[in-house]
Image (cartoon, rainbow, N blue to C red):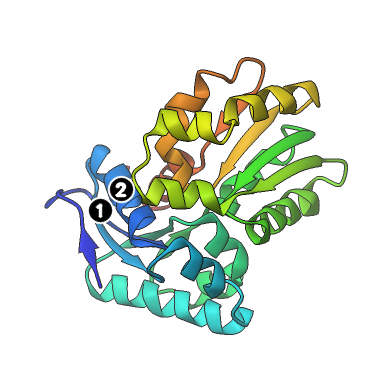
Amino acid sequence: MLTYNAIENSSMTIGVVAGTPTDTRFGLDFLAARQFRGIGLSLSTSPQAQTQLQALERGALTQQLIDAIKQLHEAGAEAAMIYCNSLSGAVDMSAVTAASPIEVVSPLEVYAELTQRYRNYGLLAANCQSCANIEREILERNKTAKVIGIGNLQIVEDIEDGLAAEMIVRQHALDDLVAALVKSGVQILILGCTHFDYFYKELLAHCDGIRLFLPSERMLQLLQQRLPQAA
């Protein structure tokens, strides 16, 4: 089912494809805060269902994503953001881009830009499938990179349940995780799940000596660069 944000008129209408209704809403809210009209579509109903969806044959999941983008285009979207790290890593993004009638951007494109800037990466993702996909993206472009990755679906489920951001940081010892990564020489911690925008500010307070990175802002910038009317 298509969902919309509150912006009725903007320089461009952007489609949001995500794994669950919650991260679809996060994507629509992200666009609304920047005065872009958004149309959203989620491919599954829950984090667990999304994880099972990623176990589908790659070609079938890729086609499902292409169909979703076409549906967004028919509803008026002039470009699309894949607002889900694990989904973008589980499909053939080259095939998605080639078959889509509109410009498409994903978190993996943003991570590709980071690969020559750092050597030691921390990665917090929704599940280990997503960790592996993002790690592969980094290592394909930086053979000397080192990645410490953690997949934790319970964090995603707690966000879906509305647990306070401060409580999530404390309950999952994310402040301790950051401290351990710093001791291991990690230079940048990638929040490799769009759900994790939810506690970005709270975790940032614990990130002395390490960069905390979200891909959302850069994804929008890439669309604005490619489509002048969105700038």
- Residue 148 image label: none
Question: At 78% from the left edge and 33% from the top edge, which residue is drawn?
Answer: 120
Vertical placement of residue 34 versus 6, above or below: above
Q: Can you tell which mark lies on residue 12? A: 1
Left or right, 210 with reference to 30: right
Left or right relative to 117: residue 87: left
Element type where label 2 sits in the image:
helix
Q: Quadrant of residue 30?
A: top left
In the picture as drawn, the residue positioned furthest to the front comes out as 171
Q: Position of residue 86 (x, y in %)?
A: 56, 59
Circle 1 sits in a helix, a strand or a loop, which is it? loop
Residue located at (75% from left, 56% from top): 136
Amino acid at pointer 2? Ala
Above or below, 7 relative to 47: above
For badge 1, the amino acid type reads Met
Q: Is residue 222 visible?
A: no
Q: Mark 1 or mark 2: name the one nearer the start of the chain.
A: 1
Q: Position of residue 119 (x, y in %)?
A: 79, 34
* The N terminus: image quadrant: bottom left
Q: Would you place residue 165 above or below residue 74 in this image?
A: above
Q: Residue furthest right?
A: 144
Image coordinates of residue 195 in percent, x first then y, are 44, 47
Q: Are marks 1 and 2 in contact (CB under 8 Å)?
A: yes
For residue 15, side relative to residue 32 (left or right): right
Tell me residue 130's x, y (percent): 63, 57
Q: Which residue is mark 2?
A: 230
Q: Residues within 10 Å of mark 2 (few under 14, many from 20)?
A: some
Looking at the image, residue 61 lies above or below residue 86: below
* Residue 45 shows in this picture: yes
